[in-house]
Amino acid sequence: MDNNISNEAKAFLSKSQYGQYIGGEWFPQVGEQTLAITNPATEELIAEVGIADKSQVDQAVSAAHEAFKNKWTALRPADREKLLLKFAHKLEEQADIIAEILTTENGKLLSHAKGEIIGAANTFRYYAGWATKIEGETLDLSLKQKPGKQNFAFIKREPVGVVAAIVPWNFPISIAAWKLAPLLAAGCTVVLKPSEVTPLSTLYMAQLFNEVGFPPGVVNIITGDGATGAALTTHPKVNKITFTGSTEVGKMIGKSAMEDLKEVSLELGGKSPGIIFEDADLKAAARGIALGIFRNGGQVCVAGSRVYIQRKIYDNMVADIAAEGVKLNISDGFDKSADLGPLVSKSHLSSVQSYIEQGINEGAELVSGGKRPSGKGYYLEPTIFSVPDNSKTIVSEEIFGPVLVAVPFDTMEEALQMANDSKYGLSSTVWTKDISKALTCVNALDAGWVFVNAPARSDPSMPVGGNKQSGIGRELGKAGVYNYTKMKSVNIVF
């Protein structure tokens, strides 16, 4: 264990057993199967975490159902707001400890991990305000009534009920906050399952809900594998599923949800394009594209993993982006001089390496990187390929690593055609000083996000989500909280 981490984080990481957080209490694991949690920087086993079976899933969902019916919805919106604000403050208070746990299990830079915790606190603070601001509508109906009678019609929004939330490993605290904060503000209760790769930071966070006074059962956190997730999403008392992860798993969840006609929100894969025009601020574009794909080792849903560069500036831009990657210092997330940490696991590193090998075998030009540094840890050099068009596998499939594919173009129409030539539609960036050109691209790009002259970054007030096979629904912003409500139409005759 890293000697630089606090005694509080060491004590948590030294626990012999991590239970399930259900109904405001901790329950020990059942059975002998556990999840092995590995430090990706050292390849050492750091913890074993229990796998919730069907009985514990049922226990957690039942606790959430009971809390929804009798506790959480009974609170005034202003009281929910106060609890969310208290939780935001507690997250900030514990940010250093949670960040150390997160870096240990995930490998990301400690500064990035702390930024993730602070960002999660800001998300809770943002949605705390929404608890008192959920609105309905009044309607003027044309229904005829008896003489002397009138219609008074309105739409009221109500919480959907119990939510099953499944969170990925790349931003376990941020994305948990994207789900927890709005659903709690809306009046829902939740059973949250973190990734089996990075559950420890979420389990530490669980105890904070007790500390700030959330009623038992409002938030429940269980750990487990795919079978645990399937038992959760198919539970008859779950009213809505929110999932962030791969498109393949999202499709499976969506299909099973239709059996009970459960509502779903799915934030799935991406192969996000960037377009660089010759009139752009080229230095800023090179830095921005490099940041967009190499931040967090490219393990970002909205990472700009393919870039279309106008032919006149193509060679120089590819060289400049490669130079940005080469100068990154690859090291342990606790190393203050590090710019790039390890990938999250051995299996994920192997997956990314297989794409690099496939790119080379298909004839793509490897401009830079592509190698694994010697020594322990799941590290990988920032990697850039150059290809003539969209025909290579590495252009079409999500790699989810520090791998960028560059493609030249001549006209804006050609760039937009190639950018939209994907089954995904999550995010995109455009780099130009010409506002007319920028807005033309904004209108034409088939993506849930378009950033102009900056890499994609999240903010609590800005909805995120994808088109096509990148998902269904939106998180964050006003859309995020209304995502967890249902409409009830009412007409009163008087």
Image: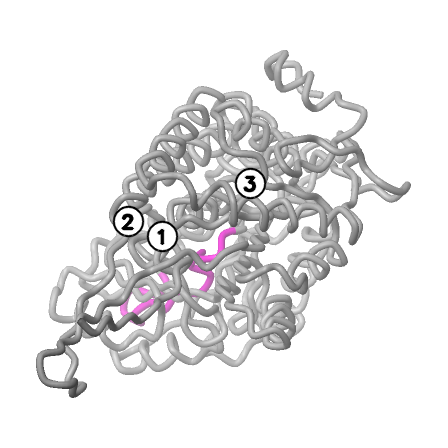
Which secondary structure lies at badge 1? loop
Identified at 33% across, 39% down, the residue is: 128
Residue in front for this viewpoint, 227 or 215? 215
Which secondary structure lies at badge 2? loop
| Residue that carries the numbered disc 1 in the rendered image | 476
Q: CA distance from mark 1 to mark 2?
A: 6 Å
Residue type, numbered disc 2: Ser
| Residue that carries the numbered disc 3 in the rendered image | 219
Residue in front for this viewpoint, 494 or 348? 494
Identified at 27% across, 82% down, the residue is: 413
Report the mark closest to the observer, 2 or 3: 3
Provide residue 376's location: percent of width, then percent of height.
Answer: 74, 34
Residue type, numbered disc 1: Leu
Quick one: label 1 or label 2, which is nearer the N terminus?
2
| Residue that carries the numbered disc 2 in the rendered image | 461
The quarter of the rendered structure image containing the C terminus is: bottom left
Identified at 74% across, 52% down, the residue is: 225
Would you say 253 lies left or right of 375 here? left
The quarter of the rendered structure image containing the N terminus is: top right
Identified at 67% across, 57% down, the residue is: 232
Quick one: label 1 or label 3, which is nearer the N terminus?
3
